[in-house]
Every structure is written in C-alpha cells, then in structure tokens.
Image (spheres, rainbow, N blue to C red):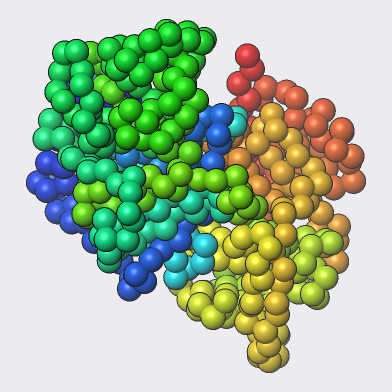
C-alpha cells in the first residue's frame, strides 16, 4: 500500500466505512446489471514494482489505470488530478493527507466499472464513496489514477493468475478449504485497521504471539517481517540494498531470506524489509507472485499454491482493431478507421453504424466502454454487427492485434496514426497517456490533430512534429471526434 494513503488511514482506520454508511446519499454498495458467477478482469503486472493495475471507468468516463491494493481498507481512492478532471466536489472533508498536509475529501454516490475481458465479465459497482487526495503513484512513467481497496474486493473470492494476467472474481465461491489440500491459511480481519491478515503456521517469536500475522497487501512490492523473525529464518541474513516502493517510500534496509518454509509459506529467495512501529509486518507481491493466490474473502481463507516453470504462458495484452466509435444523433457509428489495421482491411468505413459487439448491444453505453469492448485482448476475435447507409445489417470478424503505433511522442503522452477522413489524409489521436500533458489538455482518442502552434501537421514528418512539441507552452488545434468545429487547446509541459 502506498505510504501517503497508509499514513492517512493509519490515523483514521474505519473512517471510510463510517462515511459509506452515514454520509448523505446513502453510499449503498450494490452491483449493477446481472453479474455472472465469475468476472474475468485483465490486468497489467509490473514485476519490478509488484503492482497489479486494472482499467476502471468512473461514472461512464474513459478507462483509467487503478492499483489493486488490499492494503487500503476503503472502497476506492483517486488522485487529485482525477477529481479536477471530472469536477468532483467534496461531500465531506476528512482531514489532512500526509506528507505535505494535503487536504483530503470524500465524494459519495460514485459508480465504478472495472473493465473485464468482455462486457459480461466486467464488474460494476454503484453508490460508493471515493477518497480524494494526493496519491502520487507512478508505474512505468504513467501516473495512476487511483486505488481499488479491500472494502470493494472483499465481496468476492479473487484468483490472481499471473500466467495470463487476469483476476477472476467469484461472487458465489465454494470454500477453497474443500478443494485445496494444502497451503491454505486463515484470513483474519483486524478490528483496528479493517484490513486482512494472513495467519501463518505457529512460529515461536522471542517477543510476541505464537502465530505470525502478516498484513495481506497487494499494493506492496516488498514484504516486511519483524527483526526477530528475520534473524530466526536466516541467522546470517544478507543485507542487500536500499529500496523504494511504488509511491517513492524509502526502505533503509532489506535482507535476503532463502526460505519462508518455517512459517508455512513455500516461498524461496525472498528480499524483505524490516517492519517497525509505522509499517506492520506484511506479505506483498514479491511473495504472492511465486504462487497462484486465491483470496477467498467471503470464507476468510487464502490459498497459496506454488507456481511451476511449466505454467509460464503468454501474457494477455490489450488488443486493437484500428477503429474508434463515435456518437451521431444517438447512434454509435464508426468514427475513425486506421490505415493498415484489421478494420481497414475488412473494408469498414466511417459512418457505418455499430449495433453490437460480440453479441452485446452497444445501446447507450459510453464510447470509452464500447471502445474497450471492441479492442478486447490480443489474439482473440471481435465480431461486430454493422449496418450500412442503406440499413443492411451484416457481421464482421476482426482479429485483435497489438496496437499499431507509428508515431509516438512520450514527452507529452501522445500517439497518433494516419487516417482518411472525407477523402483527405489526416492524423488522428490513437492514444493519450493517462494524466499526461496531452490528456490534461483535453485531447482524447479519436480526435483529429490539425495543427501545433498554428502549423498544420498532416504533411509533416515525425521529427518535424516532435520539434513543434518541444516548447513548454503551445497550442493544439484539434477536431474532437464527432464534432465539426475545430478547437484550440493549450498544452503545458513541465520541464525538469
């Protein structure tokens, strides 16, 4: 769990649960739509940071990256820039978020949609409270939007499958104690912090309880153990190096532990930090990634079945078919087709109406959700039911592939691709990296990029466009997807 949020929640451990019950609006936890027994959620996993990141839509807006963090006891939290982007106003102030004395607040009655491998495998929750504050979470150069906490996650048994990068949410779980013969540990919810602890096998401590209890923290990339446990597990434990976690918290010392088998966990060659008065003993992603974890919250159990080398398979990657949907007079249409993409090769044209995706009607769903339904996972096939200008309906099958990425500008978070719009060569925004200068300026996928600082870009090379984007303050002329009139946006770039 990131240290900023932990420092706050340590002082107010049950505040969010109380807010969920008593704040105006009710903040009633509920699942919308009819959920299947199991929901399958693709995630991005970064072994170097030990972070599981999923895509989440807030109130039907475009998907944003969220950290899955069982070490955060609330339902969810978002960074200040998200609140600014979506004009969130506080329902209640909660105090100060340290360090920096940044004021934190709560907004209630929010809807979250955790994007699944398809629409029927997604998870939608309504009327929950969001904590808003300075989270400062970064992963591979991308600023994360928020955190999914254990008060939301505990409604299901969750299987973490690292081999194909999916979370399986089971809302009607069979108790894993009856299906798994060993490596099952009790989960105990702490009354003091409202978070879950893994109760390990009996372990004689020099000073303390007979059973070692470790906070279950999927937001932690470095497990923590008490000093006397470290010395008993490995009397000659090797000091390694200084480490930082996902939010930049500095660990002064870490040690190499050959095995955790003495506490019943079959993890080997583990690097751990030492717990202290502020940071309690915890099991993090460095240990969990050696297993096929099943977090059975309803039955308060956790299964840790070891992974084997033979189980390594390909990783699920978000797909791309080369089209972006648009809304025209209440109808979902093809708004953009990228040249050379599967959609372009299949003959799709701008203006065709999209009726359903993989037999799921698009109806009144948000454009960002429809875009995710279409793109799916690399290696799978999207089946679109389309209608042409004469009303004739037909199905088109599109192979989902890795996203075409001909022109990338990482300094501003921009990716663009060529398109033919109304018979004219154009450059269209393929992606705007979350929280990047381009994103915060209001540029979104599907927008047509017309000019930078008044200079037309359609005929310019990548190096020419990159040179135009070097200035710290500049103007962009774009035509938003589905609109006719160009807009001038101001792009601000922070320089180190």
Residue found 57% across the figure and 75% down from its top: 357
**Residue situated in front as seen by the camera: 80 or 307:** 307
x%, y% of residue 131?
Answer: 28, 37
Number of disc labels: 0
In the rendered structure, the answer to whether residue 169 lies left or right of residue 399 reads: left
- Residue at left offset 68%, top offset 63%: 379
Question: Does residue 449 appear anywhere in the picture?
Answer: no
Q: Is residue 13 above or below residue 122?
A: above
Placement of 306 over or under 235, stated as above or below: below
Tell me the quarter of the picture where residue 281 sits.
top left
Quadrant in which the N terminus is drawn:
top left
* Residue located 33% across and 73% down the image: 34
Position in image of residue 376 (x %, y %)? 59, 62
> Where, quadrant-wise, is the C terminus in this rendering?
top right
Task: Choose between 21 and 52: the one closer to the eye.
Answer: 52
Q: Is residue 368 above or below residue 348?
A: above
Instruction: Please state the horizontal and vertical placement of residue 211, each as a whole percent of the image.
Output: 19, 29
Compared with residue 23, is residue 9 higher up or lower down, i.e. above or below?
Answer: above
Left or right of 278 in this view: 35: right
Quadrant in the rendering for residue 220 = top left
Residue 177: x, y in percent? 26, 56
């Amino acid at each position: 769990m990131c240290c900023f949020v932990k420092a706050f929640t340590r002082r107010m451990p049950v505040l969010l649960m109380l807010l969920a019950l008593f704040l105006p609006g009710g903040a009633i936890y509920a699942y919308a739509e009819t959920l299947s027994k199991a929901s399958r959620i693709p995630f991005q996993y970064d072994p170097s940071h030990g972070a599981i990141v999923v895509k989440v839509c807030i109130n039907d807006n475009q998907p944003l990256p969220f950290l899955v963090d069982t070490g955060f006891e609330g339902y969810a939290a978002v960074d200040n820039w998200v609140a600014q982007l979506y004009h969130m106003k506080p329902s209640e102030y909660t105090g100060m978020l340290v360090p920096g004395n940044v004021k934190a607040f709560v907004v209630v009655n929010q809807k979250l949609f955790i994007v699944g491998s398809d629409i029927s495998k997604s998870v939608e929750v309504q009327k929950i409270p969001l904590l808003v504050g300075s989270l400062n979470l970064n992963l591979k150069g991308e600023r994360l939007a928020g955190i999914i906490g254990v008060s939301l996650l505990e409604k299901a048994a969750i299987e973490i499958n690292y081999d194909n990068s999916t979370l399986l949410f089971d809302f009607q779980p069979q108790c894993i104690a009856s299906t798994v013969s060993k490596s099952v540990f009790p989960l105990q919810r702490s009354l003091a912090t409202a978070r879950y602890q893994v109760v390990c096998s009996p372990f004689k401590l020099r000073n303390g309880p007979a059973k070692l209890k470790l906070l279950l923290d999927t937001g932690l990339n470095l497990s923590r153990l008490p000093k006397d446990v470290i010395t008993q597990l490995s009397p000659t434990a090797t000091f390694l190096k200084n480490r930082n976690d996902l939010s930049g918290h500095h660990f002064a010392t870490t040690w190499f532990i050959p095995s955790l088998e003495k506490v019943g966990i079959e993890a080997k060659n583990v690097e751990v930090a030492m717990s202290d008065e502020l940071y309690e003993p915890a099991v993090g992603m460095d240990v969990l990634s050696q297993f096929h974890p099943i977090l059975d919250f309803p039955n308060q159990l956790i299964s840790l079945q070891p992974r084997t080398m033979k189980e390594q398979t390909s990783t699920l990657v978000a797909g791309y078919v080369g089209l972006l949907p648009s809304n025209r007079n209440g109808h979902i249409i093809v708004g953009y087709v990228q040249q050379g993409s599967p959609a372009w090769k299949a003959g799709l044209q701008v203006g065709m109406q999209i009726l359903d995706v993989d037999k799921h009607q698009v109806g009144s769903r948000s454009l960002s959700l429809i875009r995710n339904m279409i793109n799916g996972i690399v290696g799978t096939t999207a089946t679109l039911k389309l209608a042409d200008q004469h009303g004739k309906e037909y199905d088109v099958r599109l192979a989902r592939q890795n996203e075409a990425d001909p022109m990338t500008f990482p300094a501003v978070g921009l990716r663009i691709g060529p398109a033919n719009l109304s018979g004219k060569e154009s450059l269209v925004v393929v992606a705007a990296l979350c929280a990047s200068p381009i994103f915060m300026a209001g540029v979104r996928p599907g927008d047509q990029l017309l000019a930078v600082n008044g200079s037309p870009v359609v005929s310019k090379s990548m190096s020419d466009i990159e040179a135009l984007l070097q200035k710290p303050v500049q103007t962009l002329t774009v035509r938003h997807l589905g609109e006719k009139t160009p807009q001038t946006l101001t792009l601000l770039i922070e320089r180190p």
